[in-house]
Each structure stands twice: as C-alpha cells, then as structure tokens.
Image (tube, rainbow, N blue to C red):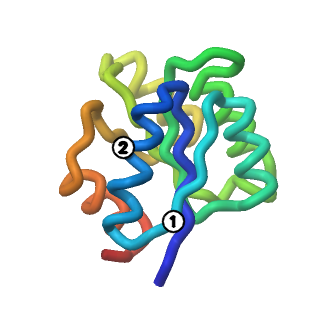
Amino acid sequence: MLKTILIVDDSAMIRRIVSQLIQQIGHQTITAENGLQGCELASEIRPDMIIMDIEMPVMNGFEATWRIKADPRTAHIPLVFFTTLGSEENILQAKEAGCIGFLNKPICKEELSQAIHDILGTD
C-alpha cells in the first residue's frame, strides 16, 4: 500500500536523493526545507512517517519534533532522525523529543527500505 513520507532537510540535494529512493521503493514523498515548514506540512497532510534532519535553519529538528509530538493531530506519526550527528547526547535528546530511530547520512537504499518496512510494515 502506498504510504506518504515527509522528508525534512535543509539540503535540496538530500531531499531529492531521499525522495527518489523512497519513490523507487514504492511510496510517495513530500518535502520541507526546515523544521517550521515540516511542522506545517505534518499538520496539514498528516504523512505516514517523517524523516527529519537535526541541524537546520529557522527551526531545528529537535524543536520541530517536540512540536509535532505535542500536537494531538500529529503525535502518532512515527519520526526518525536523519543525520550525521550520533553522539550520546543527541541520541538521548532525540528520544526525549519523540524520535523512534536514526538513519545515518549518507543513506543507502537498503537501510532506508528496511527502516520504512520496520516502521510502517511495508516493503
């Protein structure tokens, strides 16, 4: 079944690459270039999953995740962080914000496909 995945990243190249990989897997994507735009799209569209960068202008991934998880309309949406940051402090902060997992940059199709399958129960 086709799922909608929101990709929130300030890099246009990253958004394009991840979108293409997700579309190859068989799902549709929407994209946002910062956390504030991600919050707005999550509330408006209510995607099946969110992939969120941490370091972004306007609003970072932690703040965006807190807002998404505090909103009853979007709190149920599974969210994973997509980042090069992997310190213990970042992992703890991410889990406190409501993130359920991490994807490392650069991403590979197999890792992305497995994460989507694990979270959404799809191929």
Compare residues 45 and 77 and report the one nearer the observer: 45
- For the residue carrying disc 1, how many other residues have a C-alpha within 10 Å: few (<14), some (14-19), or many (20+)? some
Location of residue 43 with respect to 8 vertically, above or below: below
- Kind of residue indicated by mark 2: Ile
Residue 2 percent coordinates (x, y): 49, 78
Residue ID for mark 1: 28
- Kind of residue indicated by mark 1: Gln
Residues at discs 2 and 1 in contact (Cβ within 8 Å): no
Query: Which image quarter: residue 82?
Result: top left
Residue 16 percent coordinates (x, y): 44, 43
Residue ID for mark 2: 17
The residue tagged with tag 1: helix, strand or loop? Answer: strand
Location of residue 56 with respect to 79 vertically, above or below: above
Q: Quadrant of the C terminus?
A: bottom left
Q: Residue at x 70, y 17 (%)?
A: 58
Q: Which mark is residue 66?
A: none
Q: Residue at x 59, y 26 (%)?
A: 62
Left or right: residue 75 versus residue 110 is right
Compare residues 56 and 90 and report the one nearer the observer: 56
Measure the C-alpha gap from mark 2 to mark 1. Answer: 13 Å
Residue 25 percent coordinates (x, y): 32, 68
Q: Residue at x 38, y 54 (%)?
A: 20
Residue 43 percent coordinates (x, y): 78, 52
Left or right: residue 101 versus residue 99 is left
